Image (cartoon, rainbow, N blue to C red):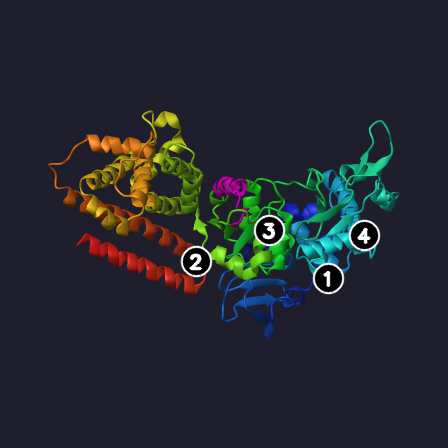
Amino acid sequence: MTTGPGFESGRALRAAQGGDDWVERVRAASDIAEVIGETVPLRRVGRNFMGRCPFHEEKTPSFSVNVERQFYHCFSCNVGGDVFKFVQEREKVGFLEAVELLSRRAGIPVPERRAGERGRRAPLLEALEAAANAYEQWLGDPGIGAAARAYLEQRGIPRETQREFRLGLAPAGWENLVQRLRGKFSEDVLVEARLVGRREGARTLFDWFRDRLMVPLIAPGGSVLGFGARAFGDEQPKYLNSPESAVYHKGLFLFAAEQARKFVRPDGEMVVVEGYFDAIAMHQAGVRNTVATSGTALTADHARSLHRLARGVALTYDGDAAGQTAMLRSLGVLLAEGLDVVVVDLPAGDDPDSLVRRAGADGWSRVRDSAYDAVEFIHRHVLRTSTGGDPRERALHVVVRLLAGLADPIRHRLLVERASQVFGLSEGVIERAARAARLGAKANPTGPPASEAVRAQRRVEGTVERQLLSGLLHVPDLLEEARGAIAPEHFSEGMARALAEYWWEHGVLLPEGEGEAAALARELAAAGGEELDQHAIVRGAIRRLRIRHLQRQRRVRESELSTAREQELKDRLNREIQAIARELFELSQ
């Protein structure tokens, strides 16, 4: 942030002025104390005004507003600037948008600011605004909009929320909007804005959106950039969205940012969902710091926009396979931008809309409090969706690719430490794997070190598991002791897990057939071992497997603790971690 009255750049000022004194007229009409005083309680102290800084938490006022020189400065966090800079930071918009907001506040017409692209943008924005007004009016019409309003009410979106998000209705019929806007805008503008289309081989126009619920795509500052149009029935496509244009770029746009920016602090967290109605439902439930990517993949530009608004992101996509995969893709983009990221793992079949409609803000808080950090989510997701091979190895490769894309050394280090905890591998092994991934395969012709480390760990774990199962063949009377300490799902090797599941249910018997359990049982029976102290071997294996399970449980609790927000949950997790630590200590004696 600017820290003195040097204010806006000359380039931005010249671009905004466009040959007239519009910016200076807006500045003269916008007394800085009046503008800031609308949102910050100020008290006169000598020649200046003082108040609590709106850009950081403080108890003692250190935010000074100098009316004589028309600038503000915080003596604690050193932010400062002129009235335009204040609006930029408060509303989280660019310089030109800040001037426009103050221009409208002062009742000063907003002129055309640039030739070329700006000259192309202005008529598009005006046409889109006129269309949004028309759609809003049709939704509010007692007859035309009745069915659409009933549909929205059924989805838990009352009239107040409909108005806040400027929801509208494109009525059935081919020329409703054409007739409304004809004569006000050129045909070329309406076609370029994709509000209307031209019939092939003819000059007649038709409405592009028909019999659809209209969701305007509103930029911070209030400009309508396009529309998302949802079908009411089974018509395909379900969503019909405005194409990219001189004003709308889907890789830059975040739906509901106009609302959410007012409810998130720079050091706070933005909730990111996929769809328009997910975001609307979250706002309706009181989770106002929510934006949506509007059904497109999250981009680096999205991440930069999010970073301007907040420090952290709670990634909250649908609980189905597609949503989980989309979150996996988005993690690298967000982490590379330097954002703190947690993943809110919704129950299968749920989306944010259905969750908050069913369970409200409390339901959201519960799933948010159990969110995973990036490494833990990757580990769980790959294990859960594994269809072959070693899922831990694949999960570690995903984490290594994330590490390779991180430029921030502190964030990189924290992620390495977390990966070491989750995967049970040394930080050195993970660091070498990340270095190899950055340099490319040629730098490591013998194969990724992480892969070999996982395989070595798997061999060790498999050896302990097989020792236990082999011993139980000889001393089946210890099966109950094994059952009380560990469960089949605690086994890492597939064949060992299959045989443990069979024995835990049926007792120590040789399974019939050709499955994994039967094959391993025959192999262990043929290996002998009668001359060994099998009681000692089994009890030692039970102890080691129990320790391994407890260590994994501790890592899970520590992960949950790192993302927990409610003090009650933090206290419970700390108690569970302490109980696990006590049991581990007893087992180590």
Q: Is residue 317 magenta?
A: yes
Seen in the picture, residue 168 relative to 209 is either above or below; the reply is: below
Return the disc, 2 or 4, that comes first in the chain's sequence: 4
Q: Earlier in the sequence, mark 4 or mark 1?
A: 1
Q: Which residues are magenta?
A: 315-332
The earlier-in-sequence mark between 3 and 4 is: 4
Q: Which mark is residue 564?
A: 2
Task: Answer with mark 2 or mark 1, whichever residue precedes in sequence.
Answer: 1
Q: Nearer the viewer, residue 514 or 428?
A: 514
Look at 29% across and 36% down and name the residue there: 458
Q: Quadrant of the C terminus?
A: bottom left
Q: CA distance from mark 3 to mark 4?
A: 26 Å
Residue carrying label 3: 291
What's the residue type where badge 3 is placed? Val
Q: Of the residues under marks 2 and 3, which one precedes in the sequence?
A: 3
Give the image location of residue 88, x and y in percent: 62, 55
Q: Within 10 angstroms of label 4, few (less than 14), some, or many (20 or more) residues?
A: many
Q: CA distance from mark 2 to mark 3?
A: 21 Å
Question: Mostly what secondary structure, the magenta segment?
Answer: helix
As helix, strand or loop, the secondary structure at mark 4 comes to helix
The residue singled out by tag 4 in the image is 138
Q: Nearer the viewer, residue 159 or 110?
A: 159
Cα gap from disc 2 to disc 1, whole angstroms: 47 Å
Which secondary structure lies at badge 3?
A: strand
Amino acid at circle 1: Ala
Q: Residue furthest left?
A: 531
Residue 533: image x %, image y %?
12, 41
Residue linked to disc 1: 29
